[in-house]
Image: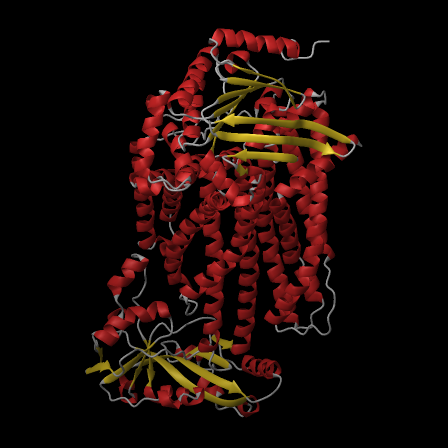
Amino acid sequence: MMLTKLSLKNIKKSIKDYSIYFFTLVVAVAIFYIFNSLDAQESVMVMSESKHQLIGVIMQILGYVSIFISIVLGFLIIYTNNFLIKRRKKEFGLYLTLGMPKRKVSAVLVIETLLVGLVSLGIGLVLGIFASQFLSIVTANLFEANMGKFIFIFSQAALIKTLIYFGIIFVLVMLFNVISINKYKLIDLLNASKKNEKIKIKSKFSILVVFFLSIALLMYAYDKLFSGVLLEFNIEILYMLITGALGTLLLFFSFSGFFLKMVQFNKKMYYKNLNMFVLKQVNNKANTTVFSTTIICLMLLLTIGILAGSISLITAVNSSINDCNRMDISIAKSINNGPDKKNTEKLVDVSDIAKRDYIKDYLKEYVVYNVYDNQNVLQSDLLDVQAIIEAFGQNANFGTSFDIMLESDYNKIMDMYGLSDKKVDLTPNEYILTADIDAYSKYYEKAYSEEKKAITLGDNYLLPATDKLVKMSFKNSAGMSNGGTLIVDDSLVQYLNAYQGVLIANYINTDDKEKIEEAFIDKIRSESLGAYSYSTKLEMQEANVTTKAIVIFVGMYIGIVLAISSANILAIGQLSESSDNKDRYKVLRQLGADKKMINKALFIQIAVAFVIPLVVAIFHAYFGLSELNGIIEFFGNIDLTQSILLTAIAIIIMYGGYFVATYLCSKNIIKE
Amino acid sequence: MKKILSLKNVEKYYGNKGNITKAVDNISFDVEKCEFISIMGASGSGKTTLLNCISTIDKVTSGHIFINDKDITQIRGNALNKFRREELGFIFQDFNLLDTLTGYENIALALTINKIGHKEIETRVNEVAKELDIIDVLNKYPYEMSGGQKQRVASARAIITKPSLVLADEPTGSLDSKSARVLLEKFDNLNEELKATIIMVTHDAFTASYADRVIFIKDGKIFNEIKKGKLSRKEFFNNIIDVITLLGGDLNDVN
C-alpha cells in the first residue's frame, strides 16, 4: 500500500514537468487504435462487394504497418522512460539509504509503469474511439460509400490489438526499469547529481577538419543522388545513405563549434546581451546530443519523405485518372495479319466486334482504329538520349519503334472526346508527336520543338506540324501510358504495318453503368477474340480509390507517428536540459538579466534544438524528392512545391505544437 | 559619511498561522559608504535570510530596506532587475560561475547584460583582473581553475559593474585557508582602493576579522555589534571570539 502511495506521488510530481510525454503516449495509443479500427467502419458502410474486398486488403497492409509502428513506439517509450529513470537516480539512492530493498524500489517502478500504462491506455483508447468516428467519414468519402444514418463505431478487434501491443511495450519498459535499478550501485546513485561535467573544448583545427569532412561526405552523397542512384536502384544507394547519414552526423558535431568560432570573430556580436551565453550553451549541448539529433533528423527526413511522397502520389493518381481514361472502355487486340494468320483464321478482330448488332444495346458511340509501326522509325530518333543516360543510367531502354496512327483515326477520336478543336489536317510531309508520360515528354521536347527533327517514312521526309508535342492518350489505363505516338497523313499507310486494333467506346446513358459494363464484357468474352486486353474507366477509378486509400492511410499513420516520436524525444531532452540549467538561469537573474532577456535566451536554445534537425531534414528531403519525382512522374503529373508545402504545414502543426509546449513548460521549469 | 544601506524594522516570517518561524525578527542597522561589514551567526540564525532580503532575492514580511535612499521593498518586476544589475554585486559560497564560459566571459557577462560595448568590456575586465590577480586564468574554464581562483573570478564579476553594494554569502566557505586569506586580502583591497561597500555573511571568526564592523545575529535578532576601530586584526579577532563565547560555545547553544 505504501509503495502504491509512493508511486502515485511520484507520478503526480512528474506529470507536471513531463506532461508532453504523457500526451505523446495518449496520442500514440489513440492513433494505433484508429488505424486498426477500419474493420468496424467497413461493416457499417453500404458499398459494393469489391469495395469490401479492397478494405480487406488495406487492413492487411495497415496490419503490417502496425508492426513497424509498434516497434517505433516501443523504442520511443523505452528510450524516454530510460531517460527519465536516469534523472531520478538520486531519489532511488535515497530510498536505498533509508533501507528500502532494491526489490521494493523495483516494485515502486513497476507500479508506476503500470499506472502510467493503464491511464494512458485508457485515455488514449477513449480518444481513439471518438476520433475514429471522424476517420470513418474520411473512409466513407474515399470509397464513396453510403454511411446511412450516423452509427457509433467501435472496434473490439482494434481495442484488443491495442491492449496487447501496448501491454507488451509496457511490460518491456518494466523489465528495463527493474534491470537498470539492479545495475546501479548506491554510491553512484547518491553522487548522480554531482555530475562532474567536463566541458569538452574542441580545438579550432579539429572543428574545421570535421566540418569540412562532413561537407565532403555530404557532397559525395549528393553527387550519388544526382547521378540517379534512386532510379537505378543498386548497391550505390546504400553508399549514398551511409555517407549521407555520416555526413549529417559530423555536420551536427562540428557546425555549432564552427558557428561559435565564426561569431567569436565578431566581438560586437558575441559580447551582446546573452549571445555568448546562448552560443556556449548550444555548443556545449551539441556534443552530447549529436547522435539523437542525427536520428531525429533522419526520422524527420523519413516523415517528410513519406508525407510529401504520399501527397505527390495522390495528386499524380488523381490528376491522371481522367486524362488517362477518356472513354468508358477500350479493348485492344493484336491484329491477325502476322505470319501465322492461317492458324488464327477463326479468331475475330475488334473491327469485327464493331459490326455486331448487339453493340447498339450497350454503346452510345465508338471508334475503331489501328495502331501501326515502322521498324525504321524509332523512339530514340526523337529522344534526347544523352539526357536520359545522365538521368537514368546506362540501363535505360529506348530502342523501341514508335506507335503510329492515321490522321483520320485521330480526328475521329478527337470527335468522340469532344475535342473538335484538336482535329488536324496534315500533308504527307508532316507529322505530329503525342505523348502523355511526362518522363518521356520532356526528353522529346528538344528534338521535336527546338530542332524540328524530321523522320523518314519510305521516301517521305516528315517535319513536325505543331510547335509543341500534343498531350493525349488513346487507351484507358491506370496511369499515363502514351510514351510516344506519331500521327501521320492517311496516304502514308502503305509504309506502315498495323499491329493492333483498338475499340474505344462510351456506354449508353444510364444510371447503372456497372451493370451495362458487366453485360457488355460478358458479350465480348463470348466472342472468339483470342488474346485481347480491355480496360474500363470504372475499374480504374476503383483501383484509384484503393491506391489513394492505401497511400493516405499508410502515409498518415507512419507520418504522424514518426513526427510525434521525434518531436517527443526533442521535447523531453529540452525539458530535462531546462531543469539542469535552472542554476545557470538563476545566476543570470542574480546578475540582473530581466525576464525578457532570459526567456529570449531560452527560446533560442529550444528553437535551435528543434529547427536545426528540421532544416537539414527539409534540405535532404527536397533534393531526394526532386530525384524521386522522376519515378512518380510515370504515374502522372505532380507539383512538388505543393506537396512540400502541404507537408510543411502538417509538420509545422505537429512539430510546432511540441515546440511551443516545450518552450512553455521550460519557462515554467526555470522560473524562480 | 553617506548612508548606502539602511534597514528599518525588517522582519521575515516563514510558515503559516499557528506555526510561525521568525527568521528575521525586527532588525535595523545602517551601512555607510565604503564600509566592510560582516554578519555573523550560527546556522539557522537568519543571517542568510537577511542577506537574501537585502539582495532582493527574497521579500520581507514587514519593514523597509533603503539602498541609496530607495526603498527596495517597493520595487517590482523589471525595475527590480534593473536595480539588481546596477546596484548590487553577488558572491556565493559555491562561486556560481557558468561552467560553459571562460573566466573572461563570466566576468564580461555581468557587463553584456548591462548592454556595455565590447571595447569597454575589455578594458574593464583587464583592469579588475589585474586588481584580483587573475589575468592568467581569464582564458580558462572554471573546471580548470582552483577554488580560490574561481572565487576571485566571481568577485571580479560582482564588482565589475561598480555596484553600490557587494553582497558575499560565505565567500570563504568552500576555500582552503590559504586561498581564503588571499581572497580576504583582495576584499580589503577592493574596499580600500576601489571604495567598494561590502556586506559579508560568515560563521568563521577569522573571515569576519577582516571587516570593519561585525554584527552578530542570534535567533533572528541582533545580539551584538563590535567595531574594529584602531585595533589590529589580531585584537579584533580576539574580540570576535569573546562575543562568540558569549553567544555560546562555537556559536552553538551548549546545554
Q: Is residue A15 above or below residue A44?
A: above
Query: Can residue B60 be seen at all in this image of the molecule?
Result: no
Write the residue at 22% across / 81% down. Answer: A463
In the picture, which quadrant includes the N terminus of chain A?
top right
Q: Quadrant of residue A631?
A: bottom left
| Residue B84: x %, y % from top left | 49, 37
| Residue A612: x %, y % from top left | 42, 47
Write the residue at 41% across / 32% down. Answer: B162
| Residue A62: x %, y % from top left | 60, 56
- Of all residues, the one furthest to the front in this rendering is B1
Query: Can residue A456 be seen at all in this image of the molecule?
Result: yes
| Residue A320: x %, y % from top left | 45, 73
- Of all residues, the one furthest to the right in this rendering is A1
Q: Is residue A260 left or right of residue B171?
A: left
**Which of these two is toward me, B226 or B106?**
B226
Q: Is residue A101 above or below residue A50?
A: above
Colour scheme of the picture: secondary structure
Count all numbered tags in the image, as a single digit: 0
**Which of these two is toward me, B201 or A595?**
B201
**Which of these two is toward me, A568 or B35?**
B35
Q: Quadrant of residue B74?
A: top right
Q: Is residue A489 above or below residue A574?
A: below
Q: Quadrant of residue A217?
A: top left
**Which of these two is toward me, A299 or B75?**
B75
Q: Is residue A111 left or right of residue A227?
A: right
Write the residue at 49% across / 58% down. Answer: A307
Q: Is residue B143 left or right of residue B14?
A: left
In the picture, which quadrant includes the C terminus of chain A?
top right
